[in-house]
Amino acid sequence: MLMYGNAHTAWAFDDLKYLVARMDQDGRPTDWLFDSFLFLNVSASSGRDFCADVNVGTTMSGEGDFTPVCSPRPANLEDWRELLEFYLGPSGAVETLDQTVARCASDIGRFPTHRRNVVLMLPYPHITQADFGTPDGASRSLDFTTARQNLARATAQRLEAERWMVDEIVRRWNSRSWGHVHLLGVYWMFETVYRGWDVDDHWLLKELRPHLHRHGLKFLWIPFWSSYNVHLLDDYQRYYFDLAFLQPNYMFYKSGKTVEAAAHAALARNAGIEMEYYLELNEPIAVEGERHARFREYLNGGVTYGYMTESACAHFHGVGSLARMHRHADPIEREYYQDICDFVKGTYRIKPATRNTDARTPVRMSQ
């Protein structure tokens, strides 16, 4: 489950219980649900960015006015330390997850058969950051730009920052004694891999991965659908990542994307699939009225193409969506809550195509 956090608001039991456990009609846990949780924050409380790029266009969809640029407000060492506290502090995300599992176990009547996996996002080391700060063990403030040095020196300092972040995650994790969670690995948030005159993410990722393996950690990635990213997936386990999930992006694009094509592309490259759904989207997209019909294709596709039970699946639902779907006034949303729970457990069965919410043209699953 992708867990988009807010630096100003700590994760709470009431947030996590709907993801840790399946709820009955009265909101009581009845069974375990997601087994893995990927915590990620887009920005720090300062307003500076952890994510690589920001959109200076007017829509988030590539079919509209979508113009990403490297963030002009790059996070610094102070922000990275804050993120570590958000993840691993006394009241941080991992502590709350551990407590949530324990509290749900008292209602379910048993603990899960294995600890819940935790994956933590690594902030992007922005090529616009000229004064990152001085991590422990460093002799100077790190500079990730090519303004006063060549690309090799800039990239080496970006790698130094990421290694420090990984070491801090491991050190802080090992200083605690959680009973119900397991540190599986870290996540590269940028959804593609760049190399140019002033950036070399390829070298950075290849050098960072062995450092993760020395700590026994996995490296995860979830690229958006594009021919370039699919090409990168061809040999991703040789060079960059241990586990990748391909985004179908069918939920957001009018044409050129299908669940079937994404499933075949992922299967051929030993990658998982990202399930995509949302309750609200604060921007106009051409397929806004087809949300229910398209999500039915994601669910049915899990059975037809096998990824429900034969691959790893990542789930993007939007912040708080599952809890609201559980008690939603719309019976379709409540049904989809049950369908998602069944899908996670591997018991979902194909259902007829859902009509578009605008009741005009039904979207049917590709055969």
Image: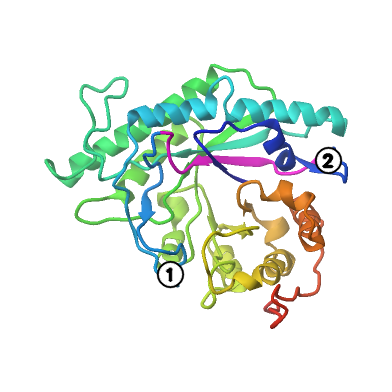
Query: Outermost residue toward the left?
Result: 148
**Residue in view at x 61 percent, y 52 percent:** 318
Q: Is residue 96 left or right of residue 4?
A: right
**Which residue position holds label 1?**
227
Return the x and y of residue 89 as percentages of the image width and height. 53, 22
37 is within the stretch colored magenta = yes
277 is within the stretch colored magenta = no
Task: Using the rendered view, name the quadrant where residue 361 is placed.
Answer: bottom right
Task: Using the rendered view, name the quadrant where residue 267 is placed.
Answer: bottom right
Q: Amino acid at mark 1?
A: Ser
Q: Amino acid at mark 2?
A: Gly
**Which residue position holds label 2?**
27
Return the x and y of residue 70 as percentages of the image width and height. 31, 52
**Residue in view at x 87 percent, y 44 percent:** 24
At mark 2, the secondary structure is loop
Does residue 8 show up? yes
Q: Residues within 10 Å of mark 2 (few under 14, many from 20)?
A: few
The front one of 303 and 189 is 189
**Residue in view at x 47 percent, y 57 percent:** 223
Badge 1 vs badge 2, beta-carbon distance below 8 Å: no
Magenta residues span 29-45
Q: Is residue 40 left or right of residue 363?
A: left
Q: Is residue 126 left or right of residue 312?
A: left
**Residue in view at x 71 percent, y 35 percent:** 14
Does residue 259 show up? no
